Amino acid sequence: MPDAAVQARMPAAKTEHFDVLIVGAGISGVGGAHHLREQCPDKSFVILEALESFGGTWLMHTYPGIRSDSDLYTFGYRFKPWTGPPIATAAEILTYMGEVIEESDLAPHIHYNHKIISANWSSADNRWTIDAMRTDTDEPVRFTTNFLWMCQGYYRHAEGYTPDWPDMDKFKGPIVHPQTWPENLDYKGKHVIVIGSGATAATLAPAIAGECAHVTVLQRSPTYFVPGRNVNDLADILRDLEIDETWIHEIVRRKTLHDQALFTRRAFEEPEAVKQELLAGVAAFLGPDFDIATHFTPRYRPWRQRIAFVPDGDLLRGIVAGKASIVTDEIESFTEKGVLLKSGKLLEADIIITATGFNLSVMGDIAFATNGAPLNFADTITYRGMMFTGVPNMVWVFGYFRASWTLRADLVADFVCRLLNHMKAKGAKRVEVALRPEDKNMPLLPWMDPEDFNPGYLMRGMHLLPKRGDKPEWRHTQDYWAEKDALPAIDLNDKAFVYD
């Protein structure tokens, strides 16, 4: 396969033009395409997807037990009722997305195996030129578009994040990251260490525990867990009453969002009370003699990082049954037989799984340029986490940490469609955001306040992200309950929008 830089310079056989080009056929891209068809039926569009099919995360991740960490009544689209369990498997989510593609007739608009190499904006032509590579044929392809809609997600699919621990090469068994799970990994009857404390570790460990000799979850520090039944009683009652599924979806969605808003607010206003409630939920499974303080009590307040849901308490029940155990310690080094901890204890294993997170990808690692000059997004300022100063005719979907990603994907889609229709009414070919006179002396800050939310992947990649201001217009508030009203109310004639 030719080098990517060389490939990008190779001439494409032809150039296709579309009014809108959507990057990514994951949850955001498929939803965005649906909204575009509904709200801007006159716009031609294409979706470019680097993988061989739709689904993004849910296609790429194949490790045992892969499932949602958000309930599907809010992670599902607002326009498509969810009828399954609140926490769904990757297969169930892919089926749901496939139905959206079929029902909205999106398949003809999706180009799979199209990896974008570069995107260059031309002010002379008021359009983007997208150079891509066909991963199935190694052919260069080129597209032009009036508007670029970035729905590609926020992490690097090709590889996950694994720290560089000392002597990793000495370990005799396989070291596997869940993001690149090998098809032929045989863990039956084996002793397995899962390094990590987040949702992936909490998902993977109980999924394999029944077949392994033993699974040890090794964490440097604890995280918060919410064990609960993977059912929605309200939805089941409404179904027993033969209520239409569209109504059920909307009612349960609103109830879930109401409860989440209350919980999130309490996490900020009553952090100690919420902390004790979360710990009590774990203790109810593990019993009074388990060392909750060491293994399940984080050093940070609730919601400073994501809270992992444990459906039916499966991880905790695995610990009680003796099929799994949890160790809180730091790694000194790897050995031939396993991991030596800083406490001096040796954990022996046949397989080590590094559920240690992922690498942030800003704009899909695409080489961006404006009028031929390289574009560094870290030099820009974000408008509500969607648009960026000096970057015309482009919107990025970056979802929520404390609520389902799709909630923001739907809101951003409405904004994009409204903006496109507004531009058409004005006869404008270009729009970009710029600081208003009242914003000129506004302090510029990192994309996210670490005191508000500080997962490792975000802290490692903060220098790559756009800056934020101290006003709501110039930051991604991460507050769905404010944005559900604020984004639809954006005045497209505000001085922050510059049209041409």
Image (cartoon, rainbow, N blue to C red):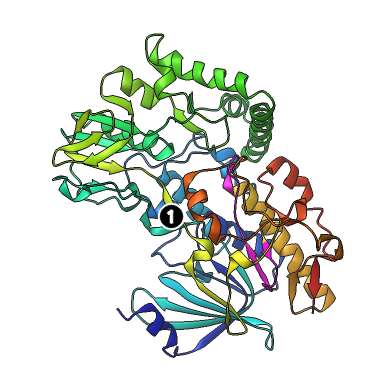
Residue 457 point in image, percent of width and height: 47, 49
Towards the viewer: 11 or 469: 469
Q: Amino acid under label 1? A: Asn
The residue tagged 1 is: 359
Residue 92, how many percent across, how many down? 44, 44
Task: Determine whether the residue tagged by mark 1 lies in a helix, strand or loop.
Answer: strand
What are the residue bounds of the magenta stretch? 387-405
Q: Residue at x 59, y 64 (%)?
A: 378
In this image, 159 relative to 249: left or right?
A: left
**Quarter location, residue 419:** bottom right
Place residue 276 in its image quadrant: top right
Which quadrant of the figure contains the N terminus? bottom left
Look at the magenta stretch and give its main secondary structure. loop
Q: Quadrant of the C terminus?
A: bottom right
Q: Residues within 10 Å of mark 1 (few under 14, many from 20)?
A: many
Vertical placement of 122 versus 346: above or below?
below
Query: Of 53 and 12, which appears nearest the observer?
Result: 12
Residue 25, how many percent across, how many down? 50, 62
The reply to whether the magenta stretch includes residue 487 is no
Using residue 493 as the reference point, say whether residue 100 is left or right of it. left
**Residue drawn at (69%, 35%), measured in percent from left and top?**
254
Q: Could you say where residue 307 lies in the image, as x and y percent from the top left? A: 52, 33
Which residue sits at x=48%, y=60%? 361
Q: Is residue 423 visible from the viewing direction of this image?
A: yes
